[in-house]
Amino acid sequence: MILIKNVEYCGKKMDFLFSESAKEAQDYGVSQGRDEASHKHESNYGANYGKNGGQVLAFAENLDSHVKDSKKIVNLKTVDATGKVLFPSLIDVHVHFRDPGMEWKEDIITGLDAAAHGGFSHVLCMANTSPVNDSATTTRYMLEKAKNARPNGPFLHPVAAATLGLKGEELAPFGELSQAGCIAVSNDGVPLYSTEILRRAMEYASDLDMLFIDHCEDPYLARGSHMNEGVLSAKLGVKGQPDIGEALQVSRDVLMSEFLDIPVHIAHVSCKRSLDEIKRAKDRGVKVTAETCPHYLLLTENAIDGYNTNAKVNPPLRVESDMLAMREAVKSGLIDCLITDHAPHAAHDKEHPLDLVPNGISGLDTALTLLWSLVSDKVLTQEDIIRCYTKNPAEIFKLPYNSFKEGDVADFFLFDPSIDWIVNKENMHSKSANTPWLGQTLKGRVCEHYLGGVLVAKI
Ligand SMILES: [Zn+2]
């Protein structure tokens, strides 16, 4: 058992007692973990986690007398965490690990290493690998490699391709993909142009209790674009994609969701126009949830000025009014989940003219540090981050999480807000350092991360 003393949590000084194994939790008298629903995907995370791993024993402002009086506490180690901030581990429902097929950008081992050091317990890996994850063989390969590399987590959950080869023509075999361990369905990376395919994908996924995640981008309005459409794209002479291209598909999806009465999850929302569609849909009871990334809360299209290929991302960075609307949507709950859309690319992939480089930002190493800068600036609170990066994704995708109640999985990390660090290849655990923050000094870093009561990362 370990007692973390004097740690800051949502503005309060707390003590936190947890077990390092399920056996210790039983000895302490914790009867059972969280409800069954949160252990739906336990075959993806192996034998010593969840109900079978370390758990939360007690969480209160001062546990000194409890620890002194309790006979249930044995082998206690105490850690003084004064000055550190406590977080439950984060759940990222949208990452790209490039494995199989593009391992020079990232592989499952380095991707999970970046996740461990970034504070993540569970990650959902999109299907645009090579081959595409549209077969049980690829799903099994991903899960086996992840479990071998990191038996104690972070845990990888494959997302099934919606269509074979992501081509948008024929549905992938969701049944066998679900059986092999996929927990959601998405054509992420390649927007679905056929509404018939969209409808069938939503119905088929729903029958198997898999959530359909949609990458919203009108394929015609976005064709050949490399950034946001506006004054800057005109100045740079680069073809842009208008925000209406995203919002059009969002509105299509929420109408389809309403018509079928099937939930839909909107991937990486970037602009106010999409938020307006989601708000109208939520207000009338459509089962729509949505996610966004730190870069849409912190950057505008100006980051790409000077043809900065590390700021080329899809959907593109928008304008200031969009960025402010995205912040407001996280605060108000209109946006349900924060994600990285971790999309690593090797340096040589990005060392070409803007119109030739792929989209994407490597995000797992920097996500929490970037979000903390918004907490420091009083834009967000720690509670906002916990709601959108732990509780909501866990509930939407039925994964275990820590709410610091007795019996919860002991998934948490200590964050040191005083550490200054430079964003560069040496300090990042991802194989790729394609980020618009490359070379900058950021404040605050995840310093110790536990999953199921086991230390999985430390700096
Ligand atoms: Zn993506």
Image (spheres, rainbow, N blue to C red):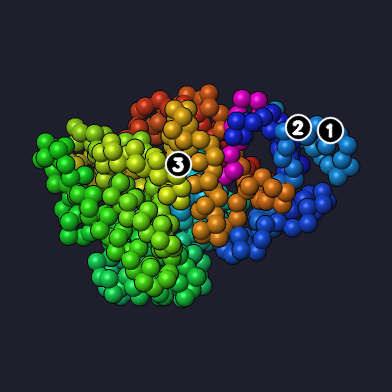
Most foreground residue, 314 or 266? 266
The kind of secondary structure element at disc 2 is loop
Nearer the camera: disc 2 or disc 3: 3
Q: Is residue 298 visible?
A: yes
Please give left or right for residue 350 compared with residue 201 in the image: left
Residue at figure coordinates x 60%, y 55% from the top left:
400
Looking at the image, is mark 2 or mark 3 earlier in the sequence?
A: 2
Q: Which residues fall within the magenta stretch?
A: 81-89
Residue at figure coordinates x 45%, y 72% from the top left:
206
Q: Amino acid at mark 2?
A: Asn
The kind of secondary structure element at disc 1 is helix
Q: Is residue 64 above or below residue 35?
A: above
Q: Are marks 1 and 3 in contact (CB under 8 Å)?
A: no
Marks counted in the figure total 3
Q: Which residue is mark 3?
A: 331
Q: Which residue is mark 2?
A: 62
User: How much space separates mark 1 and mark 3, taking CA atoms?
Assistant: 37 Å
Q: Residue 134 location, x and y as percent?
A: 38, 69
Q: Quadrant of the C terminus?
A: top right
Per the rendering, the mark at residue 65 is 1
Q: Amino acid at mark 3?
A: Lys
Graded by Cα atoms within 10 Å as few (under 14), some (14 to 19) or many (20 or more), the crowding at tag 3 reads: some
Q: Residue 450 location, x and y as percent?
A: 62, 43
Q: Residue 124 location, x and y as percent?
A: 46, 56
Beta carbon at label 1 within 8 Å of ligand 1: no
